[in-house]
Image: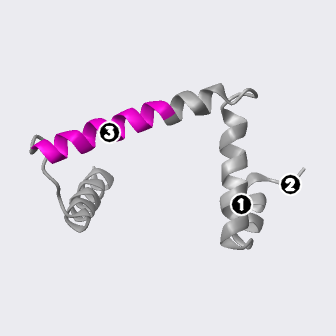
Amino acid sequence: MTSSPDIFDQALKLPEEQRAELAHQLLESLGGSDGESQTTFDQEWAEEIERRSAAYRSGEMPAEDWRVVMKRLRASLEEKRKQ
């Protein structure tokens, strides 16, 4: 049987569109055979996106540049690695 790292290495050689399709198929395989889990997940994310969008539009949730957020996250991860 082929190992997971070998399969991963082979998958990385695929064109982007085929990798995306493979990723989609793998994710679907984790959610059950009837697709209900994915539908529930999609609905919950749609509700969360709407909640966050409304909070942003109302001024309740400020926006922050993603570069600033990434810099802060990287610094935090680096600190945790040192511990």
Dot 1 or dot 3: first in sequence order is 1
Q: Which contiguous range is marked in magenta?
A: 43-58
Graded by Cα atoms within 10 Å as few (under 14), some (14 to 19) or many (20 or more), the crowding at tag 3 reads few
Q: Mark 2 points at which residue?
A: 2
Q: Position of residue 19 (x, y in %)?
A: 69, 63
Residue linked to disc 3: 50
Whether 67 is among the magenta residues is no
Q: Is residue 82 above or below residue 9?
A: above
The amino acid marked with disc number 3 is: Glu
Mark 2: which secondary structure? loop
Gap between marks 2 and 1, in whole Å? 10 Å
Per the image, label 1 sits on a secondary structure element best described as helix
Please give the label number shown on residue 8.
1
| Residue 55, position as x, y percentages in the image | 18, 40
Query: For the point 10% across and 40% down, which residue is it?
Result: 60
Of the two numbered discs 2 and 3 on the same chain, state the one appearing first in sequence.
Answer: 2
Give the number of the mark in front: 1 or 3: 3
Give the Cα separation between the discs numbered 2 and 3: 43 Å
Nearer the observer: mark 2 or 1; the answer is 1
Q: What sort of colour scheme is used for the picture?
A: one colour
Query: Mark 3 falls on what kind of element?
Result: helix
Label pair 2/1, CB-CB below 8 angstroms: no
Tell me where residue 69 sits by quadrant: bottom left
Q: Residue 75: horizontal and vertical position, in percent? A: 23, 61
